Amino acid sequence: MTIEALIFDMDGTLVDSERTHWLAWRQTLAADGMDIPDYAEFKKYVGVSDEQMAQEFSAAANPSLDPRNLVTRKCSTYLDLVPQIELLPGVVETLERWKGRFAMAIASSSPHRELIALLEHHGLRERFIQVVGGDMVPKKKPAPDIYQMVLVLLGLAPAACVAFEDSQSGVSAAKSAGLTAVAVPHAMSLGHDFDNADVVIDSLADFDERLLHQLETLARK
């Protein structure tokens, strides 16, 4: 089947935001006298939703805290930090290279308003015809719900789409939804198991005509 759409994760795939998420969590929890692991240890949370982290942090330090309130406050803090978040290498070139040839969408466990804020800050909102956040589906990655919703909105079959992910949970979500999955490990996710990815590349800049042909061959199987 011919590939018709490219679907991208956001954090760690398009933007270098993991440290900013850590800072937002640290500031949020500090207000309640709580602490989180230092940044080097925070990598174990790559691909983990805010809801899961909030439940873990509150259970460990202060079970009386409402995890939902923590997530709301963390999101607000994160939005204030968005201007300091940079695009990862190869992103602009990749989006420009395939503009007009493929439909493009975002599939991320992050809240929808965080995704929109990031895209608007970098002037990329118009590049993506669908943007689906984790707060729009019942279950976040590694469940396939986010990708399944994107497919419905695009009106495309899984075999017509390629997913780009930087985490093990993201790749698992894409594969569970029936998509071809390309792993693009970020510095914080290099230790993840990407055995179930169809292809692993170092950067989005590596997505060229040769790789496209390889992915189209995989999609036909």
Image (cartoon, rainbow, N blue to C red):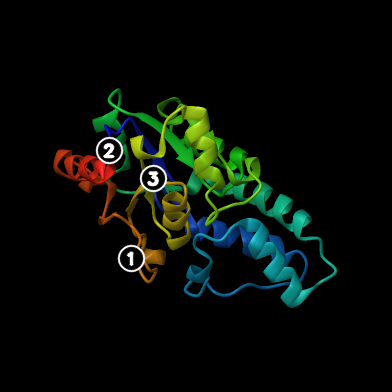
Give the residue at x 44% y 34%. 105
**Which badge, 1 or 3, is on the more N-terminal residue?**
3
- The amino acid type of the residue labelled 2 equals Thr
Residue at numbered disc 2: 94
141 lies left or right of 179: right
Residue at the limit of the structure toward the top, as seen here? 100
Q: Residue at x 48, y 69 (%)?
A: 43
Local SS, label 1: loop
Q: Distance between the residues labelled 1 and 3?
A: 15 Å
Q: Which of marks 1 and 2 is nearer the N terminus?
A: 2
Q: Quick one: quadrant of the C terminus?
A: top left
- In the depicted structure, whether residue 25 falls above or below residue 80: below
For mark 1, what is the residue?
Answer: 195
- The CA span between labels 1 and 2 is 24 Å
First of labels 3, 2 by sequence position: 2
- Residue closest to the far right: 64
Residue that mark 3 sits on: 179
The image shows residue 211 at horizontal and vertical percentages of: 19, 45
Where disc 2 sits, the SS reads helix
* Amino acid at circle 3: Leu
Compute the Cα span from label 3 to label 2.
Answer: 20 Å
> Mark 3 or mark 2: which is in front?
3
Q: Which amino acid does label 1 sit on?
A: Asp
Q: In this view, does 106 lie above or below 21?
A: above
Pick the front one: 151 or 42: 151
